[in-house]
Image: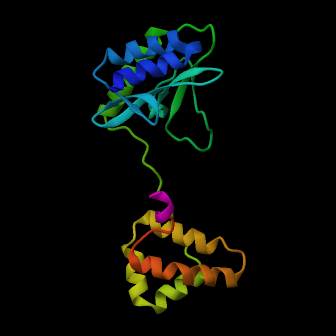
Amino acid sequence: MSDAKKIDAYIAKHTKWCGQLAALRAILTGTELEEAVKWGSPSYSLDNKILMSLVGFKNHCAIWFHQGVFLEDTKAVLMNAQEGTTKGMRQLRIFEGDKVNKRLVKAYVIETIVNHRAGKKIASAKKTLKISVELDAVLKKDKKLDAAFNALTPGRQREYADHIASAKQEKTRVTRMEKAAPLILLGVGLHDKTKNC
């Protein structure tokens, strides 16, 4: 099934919001944005970057502006869905009975494209790796294990470090370290077995 048909089906599935989602889609497809389905929702990209998405929920539908923090929201209609968690994304919610303000949405869409072309984006914050005393001691003692650990991706390093450090008792941290060592030497992640199932 093509993305266009998947989006048709997505809109049809959200019977309460069909009119609003179709109106939003018409605005977005009238631009240079590329339409696709990402994370199960209609998404609109430029230069392989998702700039906007459409979503339907129980009590509202919305257009998400992935870098919406840069929009000049003079009407104060954009909201941060998860204050303290979401840094850049903003959404314009539409409730039952609301009509889509096409002029406003189109202005935000154009401004989003201009901001993207200007290179405005929120850089993701790098997470610092917290290594437990037990892991640090073993890595300093075993150079082969240290080299294998440093060769892992940052995500895999974090999996091991968090798993070992999360144990409350030192004995458990040591046991977890002993069990992790052979996997680290193989260059696999802690949860790779379950991810491939």
- Could you say where residue 41 lies in the image, as x and y percent from the top left? 46, 29
Residue drawn 60% across the image and 25% down it = 57
Above or below for 99 versus 79: above
Can I make out residue 77 in this image? no
Residue at the far right: name it: 169
Q: Which residues are magenta?
A: 192-197
Q: Between 9 and 108, which is closer to the camera in this rendering?
A: 9
- Could you say where residue 90 lies in the image, as x and y percent from the top left? 52, 31
Q: Between 104 and 188, which is closer to the camera in this rendering?
A: 188
Above or below for 10 versus 192: above
- Could you say where residue 176 lies in the image, as x and y percent from the top left? 60, 79
In which quadrant of the rendered view does residue 78 lie?
top right
Above or below for 114 versus 130: above
The number of numbered discs placed on residues in the rendered structure image is: 0
Q: Between 76 and 58, which is closer to the camera in this rendering?
A: 58
Q: Is residue 90 left or right of residue 84?
A: left
Q: Is residue 190 left or right of residue 146?
A: right
Q: Is residue 75 left or right of residue 5?
A: right
Q: Quadrant of the N terminus?
A: top left
Can I make out residue 194 in this image? yes
- Could you say where residue 111 lies in the image, as x and y percent from the top left? 38, 23
Residue drawn 46% across the image and 33% down it = 40
Q: Is residue 29 magenta?
A: no
